Image (cartoon, helix red, strand yellow):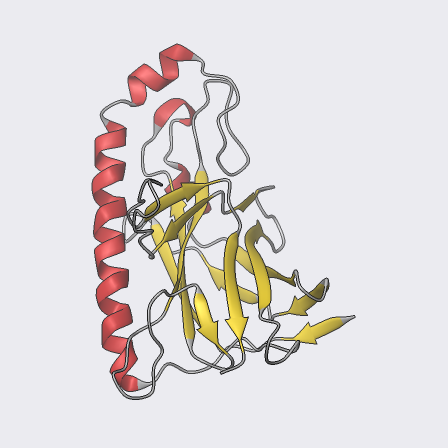
Amino acid sequence: MSQKGKFVELPEEIKLKVEAIKSEWVTSLNDRTLAWGKKIQQIRRTEQPGLEWGEPITHVNFPWWDVLVAGPFQFPNAVLGPYKPSKIIADDELAVMIVALWRNPAAGPVGVPPATLMGGQPYTLNFELMNITTVSNVIFPQITGTFTPFPSSFIDIHVIAFTPSSPSGEGHPDIYEMNVTCDVTGPGKLPMAAFASWVYDPDTEPAFLFLPGMPAGMRHERPIRFMVYTR
């Protein structure tokens, strides 16, 4: 059993808000990359086992690339909704995910930056979404693209807008989990694949009942989880 999912166009008033988030995230990733680059020699010396980036990782644990995801985001509207938190979504409300494909701009032990070697290579993005409530897959279209040549950029961004549904109906909200994978494809391809093990959660968990709060931020080894209810 499976549901059909589809991507939708962003309304104009939402595009500016999404562009602002996207720009801020790219700036943050650039800054983090520059700071990480200063430590590359230390990383090469320490031989840390078990590091988790996209394949391949060289014998000195030098990462080539990775996939990061932010969302789902919703944008408040005083009249029609949606409302915070972003991960609790009314049936057919708009939700937005942002996917960043990061390639290492440092030369490291391979002599040439992976961002250069991977530039121009085609890739396929997959959105593995499951309705946990009904134990069924939701089939989203694949997205294909080509890595931007370096040094123009070492980060490729995709904005995904969709309107999830609640097939279980009123009184029984549906819980969903999503994982994002990326595969380098095409003739003469580099044999590489990755999935998003880091996800930016835009919601803040307030402290209550003596439980600690948690600010919005990156979460590791968690699928993207959200709930959809019938309004």
- 227 vs 38, left or right, is right
Residue 74 picture quarter = bottom left
Pinpoint residue 3: horizontal percent, then vertical percent.
69, 74
Indicate the position of residue 147 as horizontal and vertical percent values.
43, 55
Q: Relative to 80, is 6 above or below?
A: above
* Residue 209 shown left or right of residue 51 in the figure: left
Q: Give left or right: position of 206 versus 229.
A: left
Residue 149 appears in the rendering: no
Instruction: Name the residue located 42 percent from the left edge and 78 percent from the top edge.
Output: 94
Residue 66 spot, x, y in % from top left: 45, 43
Which of the two residues, 203 or 11, is positioned nearer the viewer here? 203
Of 30 and 80, nearer the camera is 80
Residue closer to the observer: 200 or 157:
200
Q: Is residue 184 visible?
A: yes
Looking at the image, residue 143 sits to the left or right of residue 37; the answer is: right
Looking at the image, residue 40 lies above or below residue 193: above
- Number of marks in the rendered image: 0
* Residue 134 image position (x, y, % from top left): 71, 67
Q: Hey, which quadrant is residue 126 in on the image? A: bottom right
